[in-house]
Amino acid sequence: MSSNAIVSVAYGGKQTAMPSDRSDYAACVRTVRRLPKHRRTEKVLKALQKARVAYLKNYPDDAYSLVRRAKRQEWERQAEARRERERKSFQRRMKRKYGS
């Protein structure tokens, strides 16, 4: 499976397999997300990009849905960051107003 190949890249190996279908590519994406931050190197991200290109060669109609999904995930991350900033701001205001 190609997600195992991405893990191999993360730990110093080579990418030997490419995704064959949507679920295989999704496994690659999940694998990269679950890697520890210190393992998400430039090599791993390039391996994921190669996997995406290989997947889109087989399924060119999915390119639009992948872009749309990526944008939605980015919007969700931005919204979560905004909620976190607002929560911290609220906590600071309450701490100033009512003390520790």
Image (tube, rainbow, N blue to C red):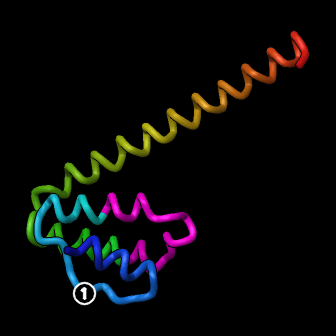
Q: Quadrant of residue 37?
A: bottom right
Residue 48 % position (x, y): 33, 71
Q: Residues within 10 Å of mark 1 (few under 14, many from 20)?
A: few
Above or below for 49 versus 14: above
Quarter containing the C terminus: top right
Say which residue appears at 18% left-offset and 65% top-offset. 24
Q: Which residue is mark 1?
A: 16
Type of amino acid under label 1: Thr
Residue 29 lies left or right of residue 89; in this view the side is: left
Say which residue appears at 34% left-offset and 89% top-offset. 14
Say which residue appears at 87% left-offset and 10% top-offset. 98
Residue 88 lies left or right of residue 49; in this view the side is: right
Residue 93 lies left or right of residue 23; in this view the side is: right
Q: Nearer the viewer, residue 58 or 29?
A: 29
Residue 39 % position (x, y): 51, 72
Residue 81 % position (x, y): 57, 37
Magenta residue span? 29-46
